Image (tube, helix red, strand yellow):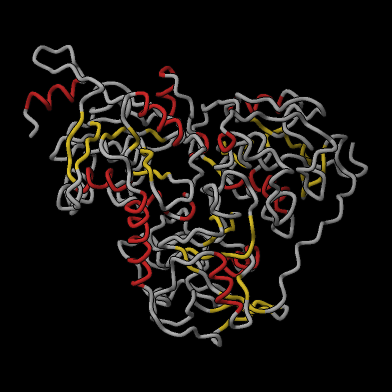
């Protein structure tokens, strides 16, 4: 039981204050699991010292090594949740059953406007750059009745977990996690677009250590299977309805609802990619292609959601406390007539994303998933994702991941557009009524793009060469083309063509690469490196500076053309650069 003196010591983080105990790395809490086995867990996140910043930016293996060096081991997901949920397993937030605002370090805004712009260093001098992390025990009431602190928020915590083939997962949420998601359940970090390779360092992840008998592999597996079993039991056990389809054109059709394609029934979940594909094939159908799925969702106008761009609460099954049934959200329908493409449950697509680091080891080649689920927030549940990791290893089955079937020939890929005509000076290409630099500033072959630019510096850099920062609409038009390509090179992820995914997923810092006229990350019109390399400042419609394209960090939604970040205009890191534009030179006009 915490005393008033305990509270004062925690608030002041003053271990030297008279009467305050000096914390040590040995401070642990003894707990008992439901089966009667006993274990001990650190009171605070590693290094387990009240008043000190916890260590972050680690992967699972590094967390295990540090616990072992301290004579302990990494906690299992089962142990972590026991500490958080209490002896009766009934607490959702550790400190209680109901959410209490501001009691834990959660829902602190990301100054960079994007998770990939979170500083990943562990040097204490850089810890304040993201404005979110705080010292252990600073939120003194963010603790369980048994005395375990900061299980919710501050840092996500690595645990040993059998729901990933690599054996690792994250619990508790970070400082920027939404209040409703940072809880004891672990559902947030087990969403399909949150899947991580445990070998990948995570900027917002730390850990705490446990002691006790070595983890029981069977118990860990049973813990994961219980999650899947609960989700599968919720799904309706009715036959598939193959005839309720909507036309997509060119002899192609899509199921109106998620499998089993029946209004009023709960969608099938907890199936692997192969299982989903086999169920569609049994009825002469196939999994939908990603571009085909997105086109059906966005419609001819390319909306963010089936019903339009502006989020309308309750229009789709999004941001809900519990799942619903197919067709429950009558407004969640686009021009094709397909329903629930956004929200309800995530959906497998047929397309692979062969990127090392996107799926746990042994989970199979990642395949794209789309749409978000009932648990997703409005920014994640969209037709074309711009954040997160919307891909899952083919061998993984997840509680909120289902599918729908399509029929007919595979859609033809977008055809390259003709090269633009004249009207631009050397080193620029025509985009609408604007000329755009072929490369990122300084737009010189062989030179590395300039980084460390804030919005003002980006504007000054372009002005110095008698140009301006590109308008956001121009940038998007250059990247997507009239065919609305998903990436500058087309609708297939440029895993090796563009400089993306070569940073944290490989365990080493990423770097921008020099401008190369023979480079492969090029639009059909001849603009290079719009995907990855460095984020590019552009001018939004209101004149403010925003970022486009993503850097070399894979978390930038695979650096699709719609990736967007809204940092403070004073933000400047080595990932932030610019590309310049100029008015089109009309023929005969001096």
Above or below for 296 versus 463? below
Q: Position of residue 277 (x, y in %)?
A: 58, 71
Tell me the residue at 69%/79% (across/down): 408
Which quadrant of the figure contains the N terminus? top left
Q: Position of residue 576 (x, y in %)?
A: 60, 30
Q: Position of residue 99 (x, y in %)?
A: 21, 49
- In this view, the residue in front, 179 or 186, is 186
Above or below for 183 versus 23? below
Task: Confirm whether residue 336 shows in the render.
Answer: no
> Left or right: where does residue 519 sit relative to residue 319?
right
Above or below for 411 versus 537? below
- Quadrant for residue 17, please give it: top left
Task: Confirm whether residue 170 shows in the render.
Answer: yes
- In this view, the residue in front, 568 or 417, is 417
Tell me the residue at 17%/40% (across/down): 31
Q: Position of residue 194 (x, y in %)?
A: 46, 49
- Quadrant for residue 329, please give it: bottom left
- In this view, the residue in front, 199 or 429, is 199
Tell me the residue at 68%/43% (across/down): 531
- In this view, the residue in front, 310 or 396, is 396
Furthest residue to the right? Answer: 588
Q: How many marks?
A: 0
Furthest residue to the bottom? Answer: 243
Tell me the residue at 35%/29% (across/down): 67
Which quadrant of the figure contains the C terminus? top right
């Amino acid at each position: 039981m915490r005393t008033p003196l305990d509270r004062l010591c925690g608030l002041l983080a003053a271990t030297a204050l008279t009467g305050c105990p000096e914390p040590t790395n040995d401070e642990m809490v003894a707990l008992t699991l439901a089966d009667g086995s006993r274990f001990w867990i650190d009171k605070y996140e590693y290094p387990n010292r009240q008043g000190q910043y916890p260590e972050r930016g680690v992967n699972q293996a590094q967390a295990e090594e540090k616990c072992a060096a301290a004579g302990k081991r990494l906690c299992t997901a089962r142990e972590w949740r026991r500490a958080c949920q209490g002896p009766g397993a009934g607490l959702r937030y550790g400190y209680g059953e109901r959410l209490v605002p501001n009691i834990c370090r959660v829902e602190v805004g990301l100054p960079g406007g994007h998770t990939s712009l979170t500083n990943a260093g562990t040097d204490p001098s850089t810890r304040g750059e993201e404005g979110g992390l705080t010292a252990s025990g600073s939120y003194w009431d963010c603790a369980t009745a048994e005395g375990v602190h900061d299980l919710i928020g501050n840092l996500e915590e690595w645990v040993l977990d059998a729901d990933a083939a690599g054996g690792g997962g994250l619990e508790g949420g970070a400082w920027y996690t939404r209040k409703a998601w940072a809880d004891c359940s672990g559902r947030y970090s087990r969403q399909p677009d949150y899947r991580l390779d445990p070998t990948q360092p995570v900027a917002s992840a730390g850990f705490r250590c446990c002691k006790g008998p070595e983890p029981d592999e069977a118990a860990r597996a049973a813990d994961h299977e219980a999650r899947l079993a609960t989700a599968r039991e919720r799904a309706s056990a009715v036959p598939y309805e193959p005839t309720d389809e909507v036309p997509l054109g060119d002899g192609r059709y899509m199921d109106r609802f998620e499998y089993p394609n029946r209004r009023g029934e709960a969608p099938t979940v907890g199936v692997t990619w192969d299982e989903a594909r086999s169920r569609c094939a049994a009825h002469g159908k196939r999994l939908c292609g990603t571009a085909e799925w997105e086109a059906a969702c966005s419609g001819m106008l390319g909306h963010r959601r089936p019903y339009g761009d502006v989020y309308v609460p309750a229009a789709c099954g999004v941001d809900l406390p519990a799942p619903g049934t197919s067709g429950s959200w009558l407004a969640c329908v686009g021009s094709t007539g397909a329903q629930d493409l956004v929200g309800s449950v995530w959906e497998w697509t047929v397309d692979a994303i062969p990127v090392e680091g996107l799926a746990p080891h042994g989970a199979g080649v990642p395949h794209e998933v789309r749409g978000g689920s009932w648990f997703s927030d409005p920014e994640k549940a969209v037709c074309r994702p711009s954040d997160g990791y919307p891909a899952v290893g083919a061998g993984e089955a997840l509680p909120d991941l289902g599918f729908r079937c399509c029929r007919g020939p595979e859609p033809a890929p977008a055809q390259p557009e003709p090269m633009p005509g004249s009207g631009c000076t050397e080193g620029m290409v025509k985009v609408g009524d604007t000329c755009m630099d072929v490369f990122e500033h300084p737009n010189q072959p062989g030179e590395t793009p300039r980084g460390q630019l804030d919005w003002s510096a980006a504007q000054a850099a372009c002005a110095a060469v008698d140009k301006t920062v590109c308008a956001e609409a121009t940038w998007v038009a250059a990247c997507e083309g009239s065919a609305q390509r998903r990436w500058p090179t087309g609708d297939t992820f440029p895993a090796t063509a563009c400089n993306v995914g070569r940073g944290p997923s490989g365990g080493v810092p990423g770097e921008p690469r020099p401008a190369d006229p023979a480079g492969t990350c090029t639009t059909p019109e001849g603009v290079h490196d719009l995907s990855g390399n460095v984020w590019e400042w552009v001018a939004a419609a209101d004149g403010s500076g925003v970022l486009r394209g993503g850097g070399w960090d894979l978390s930038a939604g695979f650096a699709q053309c719609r990736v967007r970040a809204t940092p403070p205009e004073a933000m400047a890191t080595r990932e932030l650069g610019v590309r310049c534009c100029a008015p089109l030179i009309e023929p005969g006009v001096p």
